[in-house]
Amino acid sequence: MCAVILRLGLALSALTALAYAFGVLTADAVVATMHRTAPVLAFAAAITVVADVAARAGVFESAAHGVTRAARGSRRRLFALVILVAVVCTAFLSLDTTAVLLTPVVVVMARRTGSAVLPFALATVWLANTASLTLPVSNLTNLLAVDALGDPSPATWLRDVAPAGAATIAVTVVALAVVSRGTVAGRFAQPVLEAPRDTVLWRACATVLAVALPALLLPVEPWIPATVAAVVMSVAAWARRDQGAPFRAWWRDVPWAVLVFAAGLFGAAAAVHAALADVLAVPELGSGTGAILATAGAGLVGANAIDNLPAFLLLEPLGSTPALLTALLVGVNAGPLITPWASLATLLWHRQLVAAGVEVPWRRYVLYGAVLAPAAVVAGAAVVIITTG
């Protein structure tokens, strides 16, 4: 899978270079695309390094142990706790953080309690996407839309946009209940927590996470605290390598294939936008029920075709009113649940599963998503219709 993603990314990057060479893309357009997308790629790289170092240090083992203790031996309670944590993590720390940091925790948790891994893994990736309408920081698409929405305060966002997100979360929880039926029943014995290989590195990584994760909520680019955390944790692992700490060079933790693919998607989307700008006019959809549903549907289709971020950039002109822009956010946030490349979070989630030795049944993932994504998007769009009607 990684090799396929890398080849596609290189092909898309070559397409972008050709578009620039033949004058389809101007230098200003290239710079503007890099300015808007480089921060999310930097964040994805840094937070993946943070996750991998923390996993090797045993931090996720400890986190999984804490959650299993809170479940008090009930698999249903454990599953409900994972759903709650996924929603809160996505809301405050972004969908990419959930995909990278929570996925290793739930895999460890499922294995150590003798539970099926797939329902827990699906809860992580589905809610990473569908819960990303909760706050502006929950998804980069939200941040891209903030100016057009009048730079709303968090309270205004919770009033105007988050209700649609609550609907997409509710539909996802119902879907998870159906998918997990019979697989998260029964009880488990509390597993014994094994001591980390190096307690000094464990404390260092736990301390960095305790500082860095809240820092993601500060009014600074998220890639900055993530990068600082990645550097500090990598240096700590390097310094403790002779004392038995698990160490690996940081560049081996960076998800290069995913980053090349995402960069190629952004460049290709910019090239397509530039090539068709003078040919295609933005349709006048109006502002009624049909327009809201059509805009949300366009976001869903675009996200699953080319990834949610470039899809938002291409479809942004459809959001001519706050209601339509909110509907577009519903489509590109809650819709990318069908194809593996529909969101960067899904690719990062898959990478974490591969690193943990978990095989992803993509056919089942696509089939589930083909049902869940339209249902979640229609539910979110319906709330937009009700609240703006």
Image: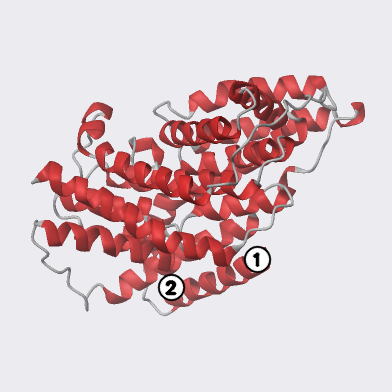
Please give the residue where the numbered disc 2 appears in the rendered image: 20
Q: Secondary structure at mark 1?
A: loop
Residue type at mark 1: give it.
Met
Left or right, 202 with respect to 110, comes to right
Reply above or below: 327 against 142: below
Image x and y of residue 218, in percent: 42, 26
Q: Secondary structure at mark 2?
A: helix
For mark 2, does the 10 Å Cα neighbourhood hold few (<14), some (14 to 19), or many (20 or more) residues?
some
| Residue under the point 28% across and 46% down | 145
Reply above or below: 260 against 196: below
Image x and y of residue 192, in percent: 79, 24
Instruction: Pick the quarter of the image with the N terminus.
Output: bottom right
Dividing the picture into quadrants, the one containing residue 50 is top right
Reply above or below: 322 against 343: above
Please give the residue where the numbered disc 1 appears in the rendered image: 1
| Residue under the point 24% across and 27% down | 155
First-in-chain label (2 vs 1): 1
Image x and y of residue 33, in percent: 40, 57
Residue 180, visible in the rendered structure: yes
Q: Foreground residue, 186 or 346?
A: 186
